[in-house]
Image (cartoon, helix red, strand yellow):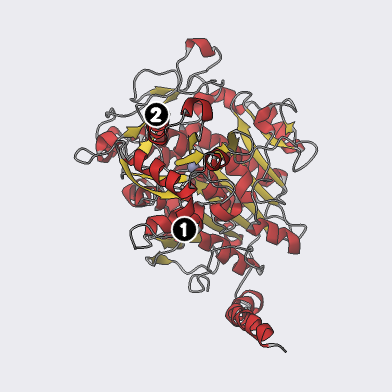
Amino acid sequence: MSLRRIILLIPLAIVFMTAAPYVRTARSDPKTKRPKLVLVIIVDQMRADYLDRFYDLFCEKGIRHLLKNGARFTNCNYDYTPTNTAPGHSFILSGIYPGTSGIISNEWYSVALGRIFYCVEDSNVSSLGIDSANAAGKMSPRNFHGISVGDRLKAVSPESKVIGISIKDRGAILPAGKHASGAFWFDPQSGRWISSNYYFHRLPDWVQSFNDLRQPESYLRTIWNRLLPAQAYARQGLDSARGEGLLPGENSPVFPHIVADISKPASIQTSGINPRRFDALLPTPAGDELTIQFAEAALAGEQLGQRNVTDILSISFSSLDYCGHIFGPDSHEIEDMVVCLDRSLAGLFAYIDSSVGLQNTFIALTADHGVCPLPERKSASECGRINSKDMLMTLKVRIGQQFNYNEGNENLITALSNDYIYLDYPGIHAHGWNADSFEVAVGNACMKERYMARFYTRTQLEHSITGGGLHDSIQMKIEKGFNKELSGGVALVVQPYSFFSGLSTGTTHGAPNAYDTHVPLVLFGEGVRRGKYSYPVSPSIISATLSDLLGISVPSNSSGVAWHGIIR
Ligand SMILES: [Zn+2]
């Protein structure tokens, strides 16, 4: 055996030595009972601190039941950026970083196509449940370059079903993986649950029957009032706060709200470009209630957890995110959304207990990201909203003057997308300019704008070159989200509590700061050692712990590490 071959084999041997205890634990421990149902609950935009802030308001059989009887990780953070919906949903059940999976954000500027590209768009598939050419259903996981726990499970247990459900297409599709049995999302125009022929040729009968009930209609023109007495909301301050936005069809950000029927778009002012009939129910508890009703229909229709194999049901609750973007995390609306979701979850758990048995169910509860407080609530600090269109225009003028070329004709600074400045590299090279110097000039020009903190160039990120001598934690988070083919030329980091937005109200997420990275993580089920665990983890431990529990290998390229102390 050559020396080179021996050297190559040593790291492999180390990998096998390290991996061996995992395999033995999963396969031969008689106490490791495989659940009939794995329920993954992703609450879109739920911050970790909500669990403590609203703990006294939870009912006994909802979130509190999980907290009391499960393992709660109090220090769970995403260790990449951007902390957006699509990267979060693709990461939770795969552990694969966005830079590797190719799901670098919800959408990004595509250099190849010369337009904004949406994370789950797929022109090769047709919509199901609505007109086959309707773009709302032309979605699939094809752009996700990786595999999830569900894919691994189906490979060893073909009878197992893996299903994803969410109001948002990306929230349903990405956690369920490439070989899911089905993913279903809500079409706010028709009020129907839809899918694509990536999964099957026609919608299952139970989906057709559910749509025939026309449940969303019953929520239109209803009043959304606070569930609890008004004093229970005092912890959030006043109902009307500076910086809050408006629900579609309303002109005041206070309770009671009305779920408007946007059947005549011209008469209703909304922040959306093309308001759809059911848009107004999305940022209210009605959206989560509908999702639960549909999930229960799926449990019954597919007999999930009621056969002799393990099934996975991933439910992503989108409404907290829609609401949080408008009112921010410190609003009465967000408190009420969490309280209502808790009651809805209690109903779901009761339903599962009667059909599958909670003792046969493994539950993971987490979120895809947190959210930034309204800048108006942060009085002393220098923070605010940055209009990306204005910033791009200013940048083009500055760089055109500095390099003495006509940016209007040449468009070397192509786009500001996903907190990256995209550059036309062939155009830069045609001038004979050094790409690195051009990137630095662009970054420096951006830093002259308000609320900007720092930047990292493509050259720096590709070669992992440190900026100021230290390889700081922000650069490491950006590198995990950086993809050589898809990301832009200069990554921008804004001041804490600042963000890019085209609106003068509301808030968002995506930053490497704790308010966006810190999320809840609770594992619950037979064999889970209950308790509060404060060591730092990321949501990737869900994929690793589940792989361990189900006796399958962790998805390739996963960053997840299972915590053996959690499962007895
Ligand atoms: Zn989200």
- For the residue pair 174 and 248, the one nearer the viewer reads as 174
Residue at image coords 65%, 80%:
8
Task: In the displayed orientation, state which residue is furthest to the bottom.
Answer: 1
What is the number of the mark on residue 408? Answer: none
The numbered mark, 2 or 1, whose residue comes first in the sequence reads 2
Distance between mark 2 and mark 1 Cα atoms: 50 Å
Circle 1 sits on which residue?
522
Q: In this view, does 305 lie above or below 399?
A: below
Tell me residue 352's x, y (percent).
60, 51
Q: Is mark 1 on a helix, strand or loop?
A: strand
Q: Which amino acid type is marked by label 2?
A: Val
Which quadrant of the figure has residue 363? bottom right
Q: In this view, does 383 lie above or below 74?
A: above
Q: Which amino acid type is marked by label 1?
A: Val
- For the residue pair 274 and 186, the one nearer the viewer reads as 274
Tell me residue 15's x, y (percent).
60, 78
Horizontal arrangement in the rendering, residue 467 relative to residue 361 (left or right): left
Q: Please state which of the two labelled residues, at mark 2 or mark 1, is closer to the viewer.
A: 2
Circle 2 sits on which residue?
397
Task: In the displayed orientation, state which residue is furthest to the left.
Answer: 380
